[in-house]
Amino acid sequence: MKYKLAHKYDKYMDKMMGPNPIKLQEELLEGHNIPKGATVMDLGSGQGLTSVFLVKEYGFRVFATDLWSDPTDNMEFFRSTGLDTDKIIPIHADANDLPYAKDFFDAVVSTDSYNYFGREKDYLGQKLLPYVKRGGYIYISVPGMKKDCHDNLPKELLLSWTPEQMDYIHDALYWERLIRQTEGVDILSIHEMESNEEAWADWLACDNEYAVEDRAAMEAGGGRYMNFIGMIIKRQ
């Protein structure tokens, strides 16, 4: 895929918390259906890089929602990028206990985080969907497997991750079966993303301590079992 937007954010790569989320997000939102000016939750926004991208490139009003990042630090980052802070609001919140009004968001975008909290069968329907307006969209990208192999994990993957950590990563069929258990949604797409190799390469090249830990598995060929999965869901 040719990235027309992601290169603008190379100077902020120290804000990455995993494989390049900007490339993943640019691909995920290609041809998106979210109107300009929409109110969007960036769920699992980390240090706010994806939230800045959503505001600057798509014209959304974004609530940068994350449990593990400091909202004060994120606000300082947002200001440093020149953004109007009426357009980007950092929120410290647990994805399982969101502090928003029902039917508040036109859309939710979640990049490289949904697999940590969204694997319970009731999560989507009970803990996320109520905050999305009827007719609104949920765009998700998650690290995945080409085919689930948890009963016989390749030794390459275990060079960097434990079996417990690998349980956060599943194939597209797993996600389709999970989401189909939720009433009131239409699945528009569940697909393997093109950005997998480039997103991983950018991550492994940085000095983040977690990226360094991930190198052993990927350098041993673990990437051939992995992908990123994009999901586009619409609330009925």
Image (cartoon, grey):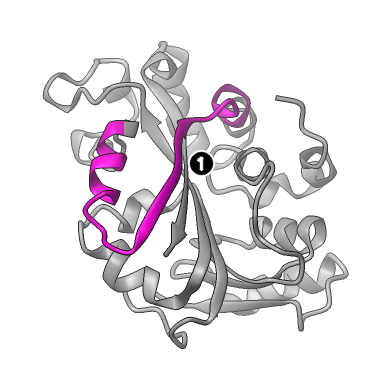
User: 182 or 122, which is in the foreground?
Assistant: 182
Disc 1 is placed on an element classified as helix
Asked whether residue 181 is drawn in magenta, I would say yes
Residue 168 visible to an observer of this rendering: yes
Q: Position of residue 46 (x, y in %)?
A: 55, 60
Q: Position of residue 198 (x, y in %)?
A: 63, 25
Q: Position of residue 225 (x, y in %)?
A: 36, 18
Task: Specify start and end residues of the magenta stretch as a single range.
Answer: 173-199
User: Which corner quadrant of the image does residue 94 belong to?
Assistant: bottom left
User: 31 or 77, which is in the foreground?
Assistant: 31
At label 1, the amino acid type is: Glu
What residue is shown at x 21% (from left), y 57% (from top)? 120
Residue 161 visible to an observer of this rendering: no
> Residue tagged by mark 1?
209
User: Which corner quadrant of the image does residue 185 belong to?
Assistant: bottom left
Residue 174 against residue 87 in the figure, above or below: above
Residue 170 against residue 79 in the figure, above or below: above
Left/right of residue 199 with respect to residue 99 in the rendered view = right
